[in-house]
Amino acid sequence: MSQNLPVTKRRLLTTAAAAVTAVALPAPFIRRASAAPMRIGVYLPYSGVFTSLGTKITNALELALAENNNKLGGREVELLKIDSEADPSKAPERMVRFIGQGAEIIIGPVHSGVALGMIRVLQNQNTTLIIPNAGAGAATGELCAPNIFRTSFTNWQPAWPMGKIMHERGARRAMSISWNYAAGQESVAGLRQGFEENGGEIVDEILAPFPTVEFQSYMPEIAASDVDAVYTFFSGASAVQFIRQYHEAGLDRNIPLYAVGFLTEGTLDGLEEIAEGLETTMHYADDLPLEANRRFRAAYQDRFGVAADVYAVQGYDTGRLLVHALAQVDGDTGDAAKLQAALRSFEAADSPRGAWRFSRAQNPIQDIYLRRVSDGINRYQGVAAAQVEDPGTGCAL
Ligand code: PHB
């Protein structure tokens, strides 16, 4: 009977631990059987409004791997792909599944809410997470960890410089419309900061439920608002719908629309003159005058028969990062600290987006460009803000 107490106590502790993690992790597995293929979990949207984003990231990741004979640190690579469905609630359980399948590295997601769900399971684990899109500030802020890297942006980064541009264009009173989740809210907060620093004022914020593509019902409020600019964050299939519906309501003739570049990334085919002239800020421009960009776009077009965009660039840089880091550790992911040091040492000197490197919080420090849609492409207009670093507030790395 005297043995009952410790057993009960252990059970209580186990239950408490499970409540904290919310999901139970599978038993640790043997990480690397020397020449075994390296398993990489890829968690991206292959259905819903972000399908094209997930596809572009995956394509360009595979292009970067193919350019390295499909090997990392001398090992064959096996990509385990799961459709994230841009659904935050499914992410934790699927990360547990990846770990159970022996994923040594996980790449994903696109959606900020999904990123937070993944981090609940992966934070401070030995498995490395590389985020090739989702901009949730917390991932490289209060939830940062040595095993979490991002090759894309924080939602604040491209939004903040747009505030100055809008002010330079004469806007003083503006409103915003975006999705009601972390990415939309953080994007608007970044814009608001940049706009207010320059003397502008955001007088109204509309938040539409994710992933709606129906914006007509919001147009009367915008029309009646008496603002001199509208700022927006939409992306993928909904960006196409937003640009179209803003035009159909006749608003583009009276109230100029500004956005972070996601609005016009991969969305311009079929919009033709409706999108012409739109100005956006982003860490990429289609015609960025760099040899690395020309080479990348030609290789992407050649292999996939469609034009690259910012999502493709992020996928490609993720692949280049892996090539660099795994070469340094000879394909051995078993020593997490060594792998993390190799990842941190990556300098993207010849990225298609221009040079970038990791901040202390493991997020890119990068140039943000002003672009203008002209003849159906996002044309480079100049650097809106050079080497922008997200402050990584709350990150103790
Ligand atoms: C995000 O959820 O962080 C997100 C999604 C789509 C984008 C950009 C950011 O195009």
Image (cartoon, rainbow, N blue to C red):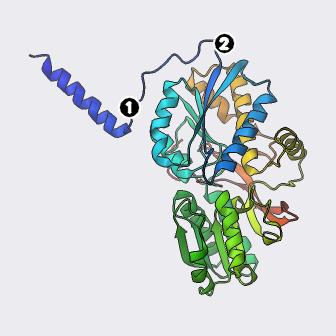
The residue drawn where x is 60% and y is 75% is 216
Is the C-beta of the residue carrying label 1 under 8 Å from the nearest atom of ligand 1? Answer: no
Q: In the image, residue 155 lies at what x, y percent?
A: 61, 57
**Quadrant (top left/top right/bottom left/bottom right) for the N terminus:** top left
Q: Residues within 10 Å of mark 1 (few under 14, many from 20)?
A: some
**Rendered residue at 45%/21% (across/down):** 28
* Residue 132 to residue 7: above or below: below
Q: Position of residue 46 (x, y in %)?
A: 63, 44
Q: Nearer the viewer, residue 43 or 74?
A: 43
User: Which residue position holds label 2?
Assistant: 35
Q: Nearer the viewer, residue 95 or 320?
A: 95
Q: Could you say where residue 110 lies in the image, as x and y percent from the top left?
A: 61, 48
Q: Please state which amino acid type lies under the numbered disc 1.
A: Ala
**What is the number of the mark on residue 393?**
none
Q: Is residue 142 above or below residue 29?
A: below
Marking on residue 24:
1
Question: Which picture quadrant has residue 102?
Answer: top right
Of residues 313 and 143, the one drawn nearer to the viewer in this rendering: 313
Residue 157: give x, y in percent of width and height: 65, 57
Q: Residue at x 80, y 59 (%)?
A: 269
- The answer to whether 248 appears left or right of 45 in the picture is right
In the rendered view, tell whether residue 367 sits above or below residue 40: below
Location of residue 296 by image quarter:
top right
**Going by the picture, which residue comes out furthest to the top?**
34
- Ligand 1 in which quarter: bottom right
Kind of residue indicated by mark 2: Ala
Q: Secondary structure at mark 2?
A: loop
Q: Is residue 284 visible?
A: yes
Does the rendering let one see residue 346? no
